[in-house]
Image: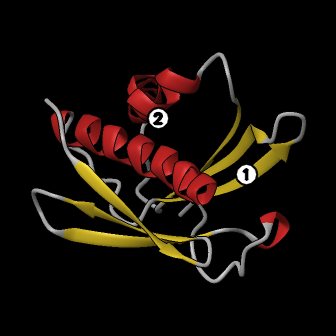
Amino acid sequence: MSEVIKTVYLGNLRTEAEHVRSKSKLLTDAPLDNHGKGEGFSPTDLFAASYASCALTIIGIAAQTHNFNIDGATVQTTKIMAENPRRIAEFVVEFTFPNNNYTQKERSIIENSIQNCPIGNTIANVVKITKTMNYEKS
């Protein structure tokens, strides 16, 4: 399946992207360390957010399939940039799951399902991904 995203340069290092089918829009702004105002997500911030959203979605599909709940799960992603050329070098990703007394089998399903994230698979040999898994205790 393919989706169309239309992106327009608004000036002053800002863009607006529109998901054509749904008409949803989002803005980007260049970061402070790259000539921007840092008043919104930068394109590389969106990439980090995309990885986290992708991983949570894939885990959510696995949870639905195996009849358990991850509602309220969070991911905190730290994006580490490198120079020459400027690029994303690493995502340090901390997954935190709600107090659901997950069984060892459910934890394995969660951790194995992350391997099916299309974004993670796309960048696997390019961006280092350091993951921490936190399961809140009751």
The foreground one among 131 and 79 is 79
Query: Disc 2, disc 1: CB below 8 Å?
Result: no
The foreground one among 137 and 37 is 37
Q: Cα distance, mark 2 to mark 1?
A: 25 Å
Could you classify mark 1 by the number of other residues whose Cα lies within 10 Å: few (under 14), some (14-19), or many (20 or more)?
some
Question: Which one is earlier in the sequence, the residue at label 2 or at label 1?
Answer: 1
Residue at image location 36% in from the left, 40% down from the top: 59
Residue on which disc 2 sits: 107
75 vs 80: above or below: below
**Image quarter of residue 16:** bottom left
The foreground one among 105 and 21 is 21
Would residue 89 appear left or right of 109 to someone viewing this image? right
Residue at image location 52% in from the left, 57% down from the top: 46
Would residue 57 appear left or right of 85 to someone viewing this image? left
Kind of residue at badge 1: Lys
Q: Under tag 2, what secondary structure? A: helix
Kind of residue at badge 2: Arg
Residue 125 lies, in percent from the top left, at: 65, 16
As drawn, the label of residue 67 is: none
Residue on which disc 1 sits: 79
